[in-house]
Amino acid sequence: MNTMHVSRVGPEVGAPVLLLHGGGVAGWMWNSLRRSLESKYSVLVPDLPGHGQSADEPYRSHAETVEALSLALIHRSVLGAG
């Protein structure tokens, strides 16, 4: 997961929220929700491997993605949707 594109909006001190898309789409599918959350939460929206602006790498699982992103980007637990 070395070349995953992640959009991050909202205050750094806000509770982190991770929005994961399904197959065949990308992080853009969360644009409306992201705009409604960004004033209060630190919102992270990745393009999963092989989708959107991320590299075309094999995708393993949402669980692995959540763990890697939370450790690499925020170093704490996250609220998630997807």
Image (cartoon, rainbow, N blue to C red):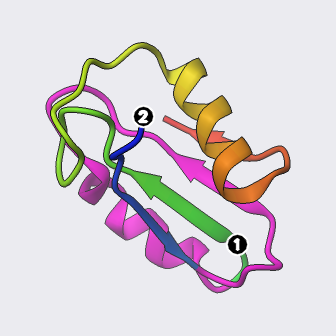
Rendered residue at 59%/65% (across/down): 43
The type of residue carrying mark 1 is Tyr
**Tag 1 secondary structure:** loop
Q: Are marks 2 and 1 in contact (CB under 8 Å)?
A: no
Q: Which residues are magenta?
A: 10-39
Residue 1: which numbered mark, if any? Answer: 2
Q: What percent of the width, then of the height, locates residue 3? A: 33, 46
Rendered residue at 20%/41% (across/down): 55
Rendered residue at 15%/33% (across/down): 56
Which image quarter is the N terminus in?
top left
- Mark closer to the chain start, 2 or 1: 2
Q: How many marks?
A: 2
Q: Picture quarter containing residue 48?
A: top left
Q: Say which residue label 1 marks.
A: 41
Q: What percent of the width, then of the height, locates residue 10? A: 61, 81
Q: What percent of the width, then of the height, locates residue 63? A: 59, 20
Instruction: State the residue in front, 60 or 33.
Output: 60
